[in-house]
Image (spheres, helix red, strand yellow):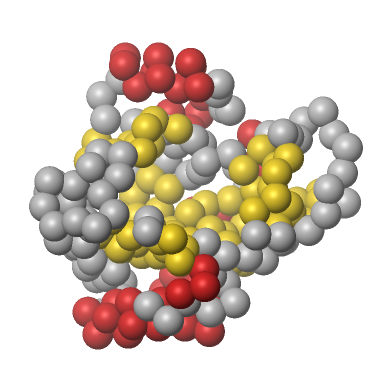
Amino acid sequence: MREAGFWIEENVLAKNECVALIDALSHNEERRARAGARHLMSNPAVARVANDQRLLRIAQRALKGEAVPYRATLFEKSGRANWLVVWHQDTALPLVSRFDSTEWGPWSKKTGVNYAHAPAWALSRVVALRVQLDASTEENGPLRIIPDSHTAGVLCDEEVFRMARRHEHVDCLVSQGGVLAMRPLLIHSSSKGRASTPRRVLHIEYAESLMLDEHIRLAVA
């Protein structure tokens, strides 16, 4: 399903590796919110798995060349933090410095890191790998995607919702240790879980290069 903007690879990490990552992430209290934690590339356990050859090979296949991890986020859905995510695209990228361009923006800053909404050409050079630290099931609010929707480019909210109404979606059910690879412009959402079982996902993003253009460099976060 790579042409559809996503695919699933099962049994990438072993169960004990997932448990070790959950344990390592549980100590990042200063970066945690109820729904997870952002900017985790400085965590040694996260950096190790992000640069693991098993994940790099998946990212390299998606990017058809080199793959450099630049951002890691933990999404944690449970009975304590059960949340709904509406249909959207992932268009904001972390950047080392601000610059003036009609293609980029609006800008924001999250815990000291510059972010800007990026044009389609930049987003086509990145891919996200969602490492399933728990199994993603029909009961715990799995990711839902609209296949092929990444080919429509960067859309406004109204266009995203219109496409979601008109096209069928797929629930991405993945076992513990599996990896879902997806393009950032793929329209996706997730519902609230119907069970108390947790759904923890380590979302790692890769780029062909940290230098997107001569003066545009991704921040490692």
Viewer-nearest residue: 128 or 35: 35
**In the image, is residue 14 above or below residue 210?**
below
- Location of the N terminus (image quadrant): top left
Residue 182 location in percent, x, y?
Answer: 43, 48
Point out residue 67 in the picture as x, y percentages from the top left corner. 59, 64
Image quadrant holding the C terminus, namely bottom right
In the rendered image, residue 184, in percent from the top left (x then y), is placed at 51, 43
Toward which corner of the image does residue 78 lie, by quadrant? bottom left
Q: Is residue 65 left or right of residue 57?
A: right
Q: Which sits in the foreground, 217 or 9?
A: 217
Q: Is residue 120 above or below residue 162?
A: below
Residue lying at 19% horizontally and 56% vertically, measured from the top left: 79
Q: How many marks?
A: 0
Residue drawn at x 23%, y 66% as measured from the top left = 134
Residue 30: x, y in percent? 52, 73
Q: Between residues 176 and 127, which one lies in front from this camera angle?
A: 176
**Residue 210 falls left or right of residue 90:** right
Visible residue check, residue 18:
yes
**Residue 172 visible in the snapshot:** no
Residue at image point 24% right, 85% down: 16
Vertical order, 76 against 167 (above or below)? below
Residue 97 in the image: above or below residue 90 = below
Residue 171: image quadrant is top left
What residue is at 57 percent from the left and 65 percent from the top? 39
Direction from residue 200 to residue 114 in the image, left or right: right
